[in-house]
Amino acid sequence: MRNAANVVVGMLQSETNYDHGDNNPQPPPAPWTPDVGGWGDPDFSWCDPSARDNKRCRMGIASIFNGGGENIYSYASASWAFFSGPNYTPCSGSFRCQKYMHWVQKTPTNLNAFGLCNKDTYGTLKLANGAEVVANPDYTGSWPGGGGDIETVHNLTGRSSASGNLKD
């Protein structure tokens, strides 16, 4: 969302492009040129090109908050990563398919999210301050061994709470 205001998102369901991931010969944003300033396209500049998980970082993000805004409420998302490249190539293991599923690049005023879920992603959520909420291995969801969940992220501009495994 970019400069959105007064938005409620309910029961979001998304899947990462099956051709993204470790085994993709041409990681995003290639072959396109992102229009960061105009459309707010992600350019994946937060990914370290020399990192071992660079291609996992450059996968399509289920929800991205990249332009501020205000009064955003998200309830019950289900965002999945199933494969790691062309021909339905399997991922490297549980929590090793994608680096981040949801990302707050620029925090909206009064952002409230409840029940952000993912499958086989290291970080369920990356916050604007760089903190990561990593997948909770005790949440089995529909896919035992690979699910992650954040029960509540409340008002990230002031008081914050996230019940997941928060890493600064």
Image (cartoon, rainbow, N blue to C red):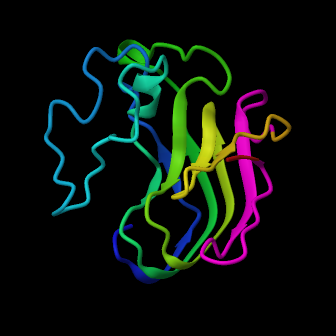
Query: What kind of secondary structure does the magenta stretch mostly adopt?
Result: loop
Which corner quadrant of the image does residue 136 belong to?
top right
* In the image: residue 56, left or right of residue 153: left
Q: Which residues are the magenta region? A: 140-165
- Is 97 located above or below residue 12 in the figure? above
Q: Quadrant of the rendered structure where residue 143 is?
A: top right
Q: Quadrant of the N terminus?
A: bottom left
Percent coordinates x, y for residue 130 in the rendering: 55, 50
The reply to whether residue 132 is in sight is yes
What residue is rendered at 25% in x and 53% in y?
41
Look at the picture and state if 86 lies above or below 145: above
Between 2 and 87, the one nearer to me in the picture: 2
Q: Judge by depth and name the residue closer to the eye, 141 or 111.
A: 111
> Taking 84 as reference, is 43 above or below it?
below
Q: Position of residue 138 (x, y in %)?
A: 86, 37
Q: Is residue 165 left or right of residue 88?
A: right
146 falls in the magenta region: yes
